[in-house]
Amino acid sequence: MFTLDDLEVALNRPILPGEEEYYQYLIDAVTAYIESETGVAFSLHTDETVRYRADGRGIIELFGPVVEVSDIAPVDTDPYASGWYYLPVFDGLSEVYGLCPYGVVDITYTYGYTTAEVPEDIKHAAIEAVVGRIDADNQTGDLTEKTVGDITYRFRPFGELDFSSFGSSALDAYRGVARSWRL
């Protein structure tokens, strides 16, 4: 979704060699979260084969944005096994139809955005979440204290990946986009 170089600009300092793995982990975690929340792949997946089950109408909604569908292969090698013959068709946006109802197929396709294509609002929301987590990790503020009976615990709260109202509204804007609509 974004690179360590983008993160260096946001942090306004160079990333030290020992920090690279952890910061890349945070970038990957935010990317996975945003992709699962929006249903849009903001990282490019090339020629990935995924097994899907069609719905009752013989339709599959692909994770997108879809760049190319290169193969649709039925898992059941006998196309007449369920009493249906199918002719799978990709609609050019996000849907494969013409399948047997509830039929299982392996679809090989390329989907998602390259790093250069990721929309700026999503990129900035993701960077903001990672920088917030890094800042929370580096806090040297007061410890939180909890007492249970005779025992008192002191600890520093663990930082979380939070999105500001800007970040949340950016995610909302991408939920349900680039999808086919059935009437």
Image: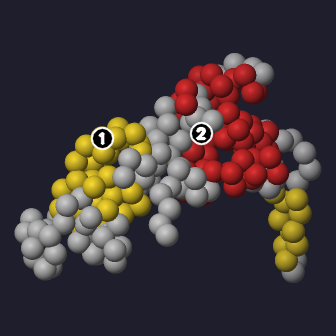
**Element carrying mark 1:** strand
In this view, the mark in front (2 or 1) = 1
Q: Which residue is mark 1?
A: 47
Q: Earlier in the sequence, mark 2 or mark 1?
A: 2
Q: Position of residue 118 (x, y in %)?
A: 58, 34
- Callout count: 2
Q: Which mark is residue 183?
A: none
Placement of 157 over or under 86, stated as above or below: above
Instruction: Please state which amino acid type lies under the numbered disc 1.
Output: Asp
Q: Is residue 48 above or below residue 149?
A: above
Disc 2 to disc 1, C-alpha distance: 23 Å
Q: Residue furthest front?
A: 183
Residue at (29, 60) in percent of width and height: 51
Looking at this rendering, what residue extends furthest in the right direction?
A: 142
The residue wearing badge 2 is 27
Reply above or below: 154 against 136: below
Q: Local crowd at mark 1 within 10 Å, few (<14), some, or many (≥20)? A: some
Secondary structure of the residue carrying numbered label 2: helix
